[in-house]
Image (tube, helix red, strand yellow):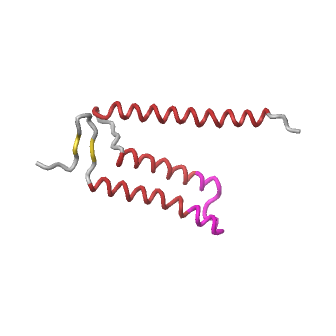
Amino acid sequence: MAHDNHVDSFGASHGNTKSYVLGFLLSVIFTAIPFWLVMERVAGNHILGNGALIAVLGVCAILQVLVQVVFFLHLSTSSGQLWNSMAFIYTVITLFIVVVGSIWIMIHVHDNMMVY
């Protein structure tokens, strides 16, 4: 009996061809949209303001990460994936603390520097 979705002894699910193709297409879309917006802006056509452009780039980046996590890393909320999901959440929280903390330190160092 052949199955498209396989689960190994550690509870990790392997996707089928349809899920990989859908993940690939979504990845291409979430890469092409920011690329097109930035290239059009470079060419001189101001489609969006700076704030809106950064917001669109950020949303596409977050969606890109979610596509990678769901379609290629196969992380889900199932009981077999609990430890993998917890490790991923811990990694995201640690990354957030390091990035936000670094930016906070750099801003305060810049504000407290003596300028001659």
How many marks can you see? 0
Residue lying at the far front in this picture: please name it. 9
Q: Is residue 25 above or below residue 12?
A: below
Quadrant of residue 97 within the rendered picture: top right
Position of residue 25 measured from the top left corner of the image (x, y, whole percent): 38, 59
Position of residue 42 in the picture relative to residue 93 (left or right): right
Position of residue 83 measured from the top left corner of the image (x, y, whole percent): 35, 30
Stretch of the chain drawn in magenta: 37-54
Q: Give the residue at x 69% y 36%.
A: 106
Q: Main secondary structure of the magenta part?
A: helix
Q: Is residue 98 above or below residue 19?
A: above
Residue lying at the far left in this picture: please name it. 1
Q: Quadrant of the C terminus?
A: top right
Q: Is residue 104 above or below residue 64?
A: above
Residue lying at the far right in this picture: please name it. 116
Instruction: Give yes or no for residue 42 being in the magenta stretch.
Output: yes
Position of residue 42 measured from the top left corner of the image (x, y, whole percent): 63, 65
Q: Give the residue at x 48% y 47%.
A: 62
Q: Give the residue at x 85% y 38%.
A: 115
Quadrant of residue 82 within the rendered picture: top left
Instruction: Give yes or no for residue 7 being in the magenta stretch.
Output: no
Position of residue 106 in the picture relative to residue 30 (left or right): right
